[in-house]
Amino acid sequence: MSSQESVDVVVVGAGFGGLYLAQKLKAEGIEFKVFEAGDGVGGTWYWNRYPGARCDIESMEYSYSFDDELQQEWEWSERYAGQAEILKYANHVADRYNLKEHIQFSTRVNSAIYDESTQTWVVTTSDNKVTRTQHCVMATGCLSSTNTPDFEGIKDFKGDTYHTGQWPHEGVDFTGKNVGIIGTGSSAIQSIPILAEQASHLTVFQRTANYSVPAHNHTLDPEYVTSIKDTYNAFRAQNRSNGFGASFEPDGVNAIESAKEVLDERYSEAWDRGGLGFLACFSDLMLDDEANKSARAFMHEKINAVVNDPAKAKLLSPNQTVGCKRLCADTGYFETYNLDHVDLVDVSEHPIEKLTESGLITDGKEYEFDAIVFATGFDAMTGALLSMDIRGKGGLTLAEKWAEGPKTFLGLGTSGFPNLFTVSGPGSPSVLTNMMVSIEQHVEWITECITYMRDKNLGAIEATPVAEENWVGHVNEVADQTLYPGCNSWYLGANVPGKPRVFMPYFGFPPYVEKCNEVAANGYEGFALSNQR
C-alpha cells in the first residue's frame, strides 16, 4: 500500500471539463491529478480530426468565461471554429495556467473502486499504477466513446478503414480513391463535402436522413469581435439566462398562431443567418407537433430546391421531427449530392449485410472501395463512463446500477457511489446546451462542494436514493413535455444496439442551475454527507 500515490482529487479526462477542473482545484490549493488517455489536451477536439470537423456553437460563445483576461486576449478567426483552432485554444489554456504538469497523458483509467472503510477511491490506470483519492471526478465528455458497428466481416476488408471519432492525426488523403462512408449524422455531414472534393468516387450509405441548416461560416469581422468583447460579461450573462445557454432564444411567438407569410419570413431569416438558432424561430417549435410540421415543410422545400435529383432529394428529406435528433450545421452538404461522382444508397430497409475483402454488401449488391469511413457516432453520455470498471458501495458496478438506463441526481452524482462526480453527466442539460456553459457551471458546483467538504472535515457525499428517483422522474417529465424523445436519437441511446432507451439530457439550463444552487444553499439537500472516519 505504501507504493500507492495519494491525492485529494482524481480527474479523469483533459478536455474542457478536465482543464477547468484543474484550474479551479489548483486555485483552491487542492491536491489533484488528471489522467488523460490521449497524448494531449482537448478531449473531443483531440480525437475528432476528421475532415471538416467544426463546432456548431459560435466561437465567441464556445469558450471559457471564467477569466476576463483570457477571453479578451484570445482571438478567434471564424464564426464557427474548426477542430485545429479549438485544439490550439485548449493548449493555450493549459499552458496559460500551467496545467499540463498535473496531467498524466497516454494513460487510461481501467478501474475506480470505492473503499468504504477509508471513504476513498482506489484508481488503477493502464500503466498498472494505483492512486488513492477521496474524490473522483469523471470529466470524460458526452461524445468521447466512439460507436463502431459490429458488421460481419469487418476484419476481412483489405482496404483502409477509419472512424470519424478516431481520425489519424497525420490526416488522410483520399485523392483518386473510391470511398464509402457509412452514416449521415453530424460528423458525416461535415466531412462528406470535403471527401467528395478528394475522392474519385464517393458512396454515402444512409440509414436515417438528418436535418441540416447552412452554417454560413465566415471570417470574423474585427468590429463584431470588439463589440462582443466590450460587453463580454453581459453577453455571457444573457447566454446563461437562455434555455440553450447560447445567444439564440425563442421570443414568445408561436408557429401555430402565425400566418404562413410569418412562418416563411422567420424560417427564411433563420436559414439565411445559419446555425442552430433555427430551433429558436418559434417558442413552440420543440413543444408542439403541428408547429414543428411547419419547420419540416420549410426544410423539405429547401432540400428539394438544392438537390437536383428528385429521388435523392426525397431520400435526404427526413421523416421525423426537426430537432428530436441534434440539428446539424453544414457547408455545402446537400449541394454535394449534385456531383456526378457522389452516390447515395438507402440502407434503412436493407441494412448493410457484411463487409468483404473488397467492400461491402447491402440488398444483395456488392460495392467495392479503396477505403471505408465509419461516421457512426458515439456511445453518448454514458459510453466513456461504462467503459471503465467503476464499483461503488458493496462492490456494485456502475454498469449494474445503470442496467436500465443512467440514474443520477442532477447529473452530478449517483446513489451508491460516494464522492464520485460527473461533469455534464446524464440528467443534466449537457448536450442540449452550449457545452462550455454547462461545463463551467458543473465544474464550479463540484469544486465548491469539494471545498465545502474540506472546510467541514467531511469524508463522503452521496446522492440519496429518494433524491435520485425524484430527479430521474422530473427529467423524464420535462422531456415528455417536449418533442425531443419523439425519435430514435443518441439522446436516447438508440444508435447503440442493446443500450437502454432513456432520454438522458435535461431540457432547460436556467431552471437546472436554479435547482443546483438551491441544493447547495440548503447544505447539499438531496445528498447524504458523512464525517471523516
Image: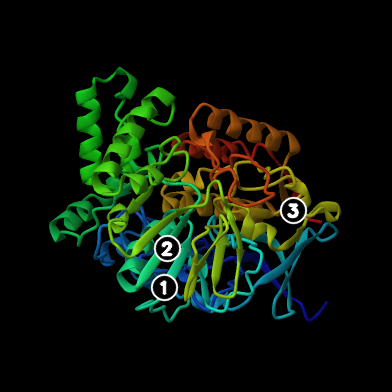
Q: Is there a contact, CB below 8 Å, between mark 2 and mark 1? A: yes
**Label 3 neighbourhood size at 10 Å, few (<14), some (14-19), many (20+)?**
many
Amino acid on which the number 3 mark rests in the picture: Leu
* Of pointers 3 and 1, the one earlier in the residue sequence: 1
Give the class, few, some or many, for how many residues have Cα within 10 Å of label 1's Cα (few <14, many ≥20): some
From the image, tell me which residue sits under label 1: 178
Disc nearer the start of the sequence (2/3): 2
Position in image of residue 433 (x %, y %): 43, 45
SS state under label 3: helix
Q: Which residue is disc 3 drawn over?
A: 398
Q: Please, what is the three-letter code of the amino acid marked with disc 1?
A: Asn
Q: Residue 175's image quarter? A: bottom left
Looking at the image, which residue is at 61% across and 36% down? 522
Which residue: 65% across, 37% down?
525
Q: Of label 2 and label 1, which has the lower sequence position?
A: 1
Q: Is residue 202 left or right of residue 487?
A: left
Name the secondary structure under disc 2. Answer: strand
Indicate the secondary structure of the residue bearing disc 1.
strand
Residue under circle 2? 203
How much space separates mark 2 and mark 1, taking CA atoms?
Answer: 8 Å
* 148 relative position to 371: left or right: right
Q: Residues within 10 Å of mark 2 (few under 14, many from 20)?
A: many
The answer to which image quadrant residue 338 occupies is bottom left
